[in-house]
Image: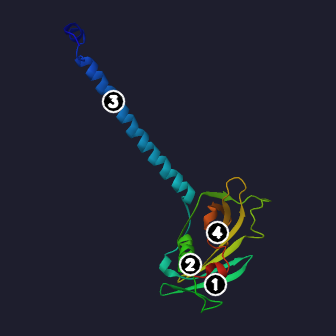
């Protein structure tokens, strides 16, 4: 490089450096805001998937029985001292994780939506996919799982004796749609 080329090549002026710094700072701030916004959106989507409307809250240590009636038949699980047994066949070796998944599902059951039952509307409660009765130290709660919503894939749910209709994630129903063979552990 010649002396003339060096002289014509001026170092960056302070204003140009300042502008570049401001642009970089602005880009970093925008990235931070976008990241925080994405985290909030993911958290909201997760809560919506699980539901945020409380339907049933039962302390898990008070559950004594879970009875499931479905097309495959009726099964009753009994819990004593944290261990599960099948009432219909006490010597049957149960998969504890399946039983605990059911316990978790009823311990804190949240719905995505709450609807008022509309006259003439068919939610599938006349021929439910499953009816689940939970016996606790303080009484019983019965949940009736109706039809699946064709658009969302969620399942209609109603508590026995109440008129409100809820929609819950289909995973809440799926843990109860097990026959005896599926509960083998």
Q: Secondary structure at mark 2?
A: helix
Q: Quadrant of the C terminus?
A: bottom right
Query: Residue 135, how many percent across, how many down?
Result: 58, 82
Mark 4 or mark 1, earlier in chain: 1
Residue depicted at 53% across the width and 76% down the height: 97
Label annotation for residue 181: none
Instruction: State the SS at label 4.
Output: helix
User: In 3D space, how far apart are the residues under numbered discs 3 and 4 (Cα atoms)?
Assistant: 50 Å
Q: Residues within 10 Å of mark 3 (few under 14, many from 20)?
A: few
User: Foreground residue, 144 or 130?
Assistant: 130
Query: x, y (%) of residue 29?
Result: 36, 35
- What is the secondary structure assignment of the residue under circle 3? helix
Sequence-first tag of 2 and 4:
2
Q: Residues within 10 Å of mark 2 (few under 14, many from 20)?
A: many
Residue at which label 4 appears: 174
120 and 75: which is toward the camera = 75
User: How does the figure colour the protein chain or chains?
Assistant: rainbow
Q: Which residue is mark 1?
A: 76
Q: What label sits on residue 99 in the rendered view?
A: 2
The residue that label 3 is drawn on is: 24
The numbered mark, 1 or 3, whose residue comes first in the sequence reads 3
Disc 2 to disc 3, how far (Cα)? 54 Å
Q: Quadrant of residue 88?
A: bottom right
**Residue closest to the far bottom:** 91
Cα distance between the residues tagged 2 and 4: 12 Å
Find residue 53 and report its horizontal and vertical position in percent: 56, 60
Q: CA distance from mark 1 to mark 3?
A: 64 Å
User: For the residues marked 2 and 1, what is the alpha-carbon distance in whole angstroms?
Assistant: 11 Å
| Badge count | 4
């Amino acid at each position: 490089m010649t002396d003339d080329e060096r002289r014509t090549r001026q170092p960056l002026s302070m204003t140009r450096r300042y502008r570049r710094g401001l642009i970089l700072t602005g880009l970093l701030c925008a990235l931070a805001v976008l990241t925080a916004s994405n985290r909030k959106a993911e958290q909201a989507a997760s809560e919506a998937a699980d539901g945020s409307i409380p339907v049933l809250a039962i302390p898990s240590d008070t559950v004594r029985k879970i009875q499931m009636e479905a097309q495959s038949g009726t099964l009753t699980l009994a819990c004593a001292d944290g261990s599960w047994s099948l009432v219909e066949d006490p010597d049957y070796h149960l998969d504890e994780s399946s039983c605990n998944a059911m316990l978790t599902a009823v311990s804190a059951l949240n719905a995505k939506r709450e609807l008022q039952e509309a006259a003439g509307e068919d939610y599938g409660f006349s021929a439910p996919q499953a009816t689940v009765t939970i016996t606790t130290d303080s009484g019983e709660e019965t949940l009736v799982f109706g039809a699946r919503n064709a658009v969302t894939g969620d399942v209609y749910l109603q508590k026995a004796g109440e008129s409100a209709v809820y929609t819950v994630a289909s995973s809440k129903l799926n843990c109860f749609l097990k026959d005896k063979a599926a509960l083998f552990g």
